[in-house]
Image (spheres, rainbow, N blue to C red):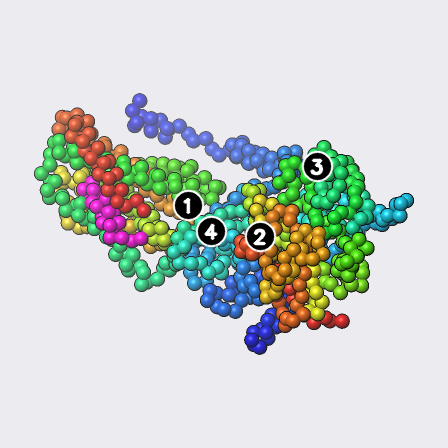
Amino acid sequence: MATGGAVITALTATQRAGAQAPTMHPHQAALGETKPSHYGHGNMITVGDVDLARNGFDPTALLTDWERGTVSRLPDGRTLRTFEIVGEDKEIEVAPGIMFPAWTFNGRVPGPTLRATEGERLRIVFKNQGSHTHTMHFHGIHSARMDGIPGAGEVLPGGEFTYEFDALPFGCHLYHCHSLPLKRHIHKGMYGAFIVDPDPERHPEQALIARTRLLGTPENKNWQELVMVMNGFDTNFDNENEIYAVHSVAHHFSKHPIRIDRARPVRIYLVNVLEFDLINSFHLHANFFDYFDHGTTLTPTLKTVDTIMQCQAQRGILEFTYQKHETGLYMFHAHQSEFAELGWMGMFDVAEATS
Amino acid sequence: MSEVTRAQRDAARPRPPVSGASLLWVVLPLLALVLSTVWLVGSDWLRAFDTGAPPVEKLTFERTILDGDGIHVTVRAGGSEPVTIAQVQVDDAYWTFRQEPPGPLDRLAAAWLHIPYPWVLGEKHEIKVVSKTGTTFKKEIEVAVPTPQPQIGVLGPQALLGAFVGIVPVVIGMLFYPALRGFGGQRMNFLLALTVGLLVFLFIDSLKEAIEFGIKAASAFQGIAMVLVVAAIAFIVLFVVGRRHGTPTGVALAAYIALGIGLHNFGEGLAIGAAFAAGVAGLGMFLVMGFTLHNVTEGIGIVAPLLDSRPSFPTFVWLALLAGAPAIPGLWLGSVSYAPQWSALALAIGAGAILQVIVEVSAYLAQSAAKRGERWMTPSALAGLVVGLGVMYATAILVKV
């Protein structure tokens, strides 16, 4: 065990030092040789690295990139939160060297993670600068006029529409384009996470738990919060995905493990938007988590599990900790092996806090 | 006008000197070609046809080698722009790979992909190459077996196998020669027609196989056109060479038949070798005996034009070798996994050569019938034709791998 730990540490150090370099030497590992070139995946990996600067977004940065919009007060004293979203066509690199002609919200896939607080008034100004008609359809509570479907808030290229509703219910939600054909509009990249934090005043009996979920509170700061949108890409348009990922780039989190402070708890807002495949899943190695389906409750809907599955648009919150674990690389992936091997696989690099 | 007078007149007429004017009319068209190319490239007016669609990409798999290091394949590019290979999947998993030489593949350029994948003996695998545009190209490995390496230890048994399916049956067929010698008239007609029948079958078989390989080759090779063009050229060349001294008869005709059959056996060797290399056929005794039986008829066909003459023993030996021995190099080449266009080429030449002997044996049949004052198309000739085709088809059932 001790030697194993040493090997892992050494490899981790190499990966940190030269994250770009070690991906281009596949052939040295002959069959039967037991020493893999990459910890955890051996030769089962994409070759090379994605040009994140050209893409304009880094999947690692997206994990904690909360879009808060601009805040103002309504005459009745309520908070009005306004988001501005632009629909645009953009070619993105979804695996090293593989370009995909995407339709995006704000030039990234997934679109911005909109984060609000329960009960706020939300205004989403959507400008469509893409080549096709688009909408923003929110999973939440709103009027028929604000549903973002053909006939209600559909925006022609060059047009604009403002969706307005209350941030309800609290939970982990999503938004996506609902123009037709729906399948094409979703898998081309038009989706994003929509998180509504609980208002502790509305949940007096569970106020403390609610405060840990409310972004910006001292209780919330102790948590390491990450958003993960599980998606895929059908690069040859045969209604089957060639790429599976979290935040679009195949194997990104295998090559760039997510740093986790061992001492602090982890909360993942997990959203599945995968097209074509019936379900997607999340499996955590060497650990168990509590799960809040849709995130609409403050008590777990599933306790102590290490695998959950989600159909398209299903989402939830995962809570777990590595406090009692040794440091090291801990894997997570879809437990459809095919998805994992086609890109939906990653690593948590659990380490002591560096402060 | 007789040939002599025409030749005399041509010689008498003064040849026009190579003047500056005629040279100009060589240079001018070439200059026009260069100028139009420069204009096309320089003005870029073709841009008007640019629809914004992604480039057409084509990738053809040629060789596949499985060994202790994993899977190695050669790919050849086609299409409108160079193909950039971005990633490789094996059995729906992204796998590391090394491209040799690296970089985008120009039209008709080929490269090796070395994939350190732990393939499983006897099972099916699928390689999927993903290009820059996300287009995928699939190659199925039906049954994974190690690709035979061209080693001395393997060459021996393969040569023996080639000799058994190529030379042995031809020799057996030739052994009927003394019994056939007494043939005359209708029986002779029957035998020659039988030869034509078997050759027609071999022609169809060669052409079919050639076209099948041609379709597998990269599209720029234009598989079917290449096969037909090469077969036509082979036919014309052999036909003209064969008729230098008039219609070939006797040993000369037998030699052309042996050559055509030899080229066909070369192709058959390629197919057997490739089938075993790809693991799609087990080398059963039944299969080998099938080939032997199938090829016995060929020996009879070769000696059919020799019934009037009395050839020496060495003549029979080299005829047998010419017809049977090419199966040996065919097997060697076939088993090391080669690109499909080479098989198509070899089989197309064979088809052309067989067509030549079909024409010549038919001519010989007609001539010898005329010499005896008979019509060539007699019931016995018709029967020979049908029996030749039928026997070859029936025995081929045993050997289709």
Q: Does residue B113 sit above or below A330 in this rendering?
A: above
The CA distance from mark 1 to mark 2 is 26 Å
Q: Are the residues flagged by discs 4 and 1 from a single subunit?
A: yes
Disc 2: CA contacts within 10 A as few (<14), some (14-19) or many (>=20): many
Q: Earlier in the sequence, mark 4 or mark 1?
A: 4
Magenta part, dominant SS: helix
Furthest-bottom residue in view? A2
Give the amino acid at mark 4: Glu
Give the amino acid at mark 1: Gln
The chain under label 3 reads: A
Q: Residue tagged by mark 2? A: B86
Instruction: Tell me, yes or no, whether the two marked residues, 1 and 2, touch with CB atoms within 8 Å.
Output: no
The CA distance from mark 4 to mark 1 is 22 Å
Give the amino acid at mark 3: Ile
Res A239 → quadrant: top right
Q: Are the residues flagged by discs 1 and 3 from a single subunit?
A: no
Q: Residue B204: percent from the left, percent from the top?
A: 31, 37
Q: Residue B331: percent from the left, percent from the top?
A: 32, 52
Residue A261 shows in the view: yes
The chain under label 1 reads: B
Q: Earlier in the sequence, mark 4 or mark 2?
A: 2
Quadrant where the N terminus of chain B sits is top left
Q: Earlier in the sequence, mark 1 or mark 2?
A: 2
Furthest-front residue in view? A205
- For the point 62% across and 40% down, the residue is A183
Q: Residue B109: percent from the left, percent from the top?
A: 51, 49
Tag shown at residue A307: none
The CA distance from mark 1 to mark 3 is 54 Å
Q: Are the residues flagged by discs 4 and 3 from a single subunit?
A: no
Q: Which residues are magenta?
A: B282-301
